[in-house]
Amino acid sequence: MSEPSAGRRCGFVAVVGAPNAGKSTLVNRLVGAKVSIVTHKVQTTRTRIRGIAVEGESQMVFVDTPGIFNAKRRLERAMVQAAWAGVEDADVVLVVHDASKKRVSDEARMVITGIPEASREVVLVLNKIDLVKRERLLELTAELSQAREFAEVFMISASSGDGVADLSEFLASRMPPGPWHFPEDQISDITLRLMASEITREKLFLNLHQELPYSLTVESESWQEFDDGSVRIEQSVFVAREQHKAMCLGKGGKTIRAVRQAAQSDLEQVLGQPVHLFIFVKVRENWINDPERYRMLGLEFDA
């Protein structure tokens, strides 16, 4: 924990919403660096990932939560429980809503009405405003405000950054007085191994177009630093079936090579050093019911 300083503020901001509302893109934008994976697919964030940003004298710890939806499978239930747990500890809750949707989904309403009434402020963030006419934004604000009272409403585009600076300034002013929890230059509290695994999982999501990504997990099993400043990272991709392994590898290994190249490039940017990435695809039939896998992701197995 950093040394206390007069005038400093520090607090937690939970970022919640229905799947694919743009939560991870917003957190990355607020932090100014990639701390959470972003894909065009829903339900890609599995665990609570904390990104850290400084605005003036305020340090804000953003908790990027899994999307909240009507969960049926064990992993889905654990993801949703993690999302709600992120809300409980927050000083401010950001409800991110995809304004480009033609109608407000049941999942979006479940998020808005499910946040418990407490001393924390709840802020509505209408995202993807570059895809919507202003008249629709005003209608949407009125409609969602009927479900609950919001402390403030912000209209932004997380992808372009439009409106995000105003949101950041507002959040900084709402942080409670107190010492910073993290060093000034730290942008996340997740381990480098987990971040590396998440980056590779993102690339798998982007390269696999079926339901397969929801049936795989990635673990960084070996991390070896060399004297020349480079690092060798060995990762295992666990899938449930042999046919899933074949899909991950692709014809002649084409898919996994593309995944490796993209992940290695991202890792070199994040780590600031040359990376030698090795990925192995393995079949572990019942990984999705293995308590150890959940523990590594910071999820509750019995959710």
Image (tube, rainbow, N blue to C red):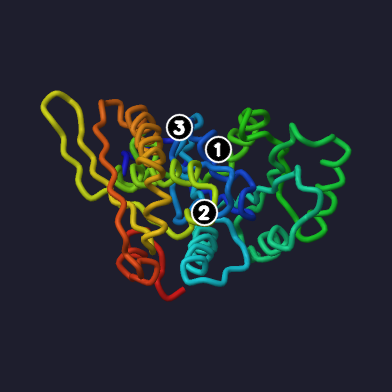
Q: Is residue 62 above or below residue 187?
A: below
Give the structural element (helix, strand or loop) at label 1: helix
Q: Report whether residue 54 is seen.
A: yes
Give the structural element (helix, strand or loop) at label 2: loop
Picture quarter with the N terminus: top left
Going from N to C along the chain, the mark reached first, 3 or 1, is: 3
Q: Residue at x 82, y 58 (%)?
A: 146
Find residue 287 and report its horizontal and vertical position in percent: 35, 66
Find residue 251 and report its horizontal and vertical position in percent: 40, 42
- The kind of residue tagged 1 is Ala
Q: Which residue is mark 1?
A: 172
Q: Nearer the viewer, mark 2 or mark 1?
A: 2
- The kind of residue tagged 3 is Ala
What is the residue that sits farthest to the front in this orientation? 252
Q: Nearer the viewer, residue 161 or 264?
A: 264
Number of residues whose C-alpha sits closer than 10 Å to that of mark 3, classed few (under 14), some (14–19) or many (20 or more):
some
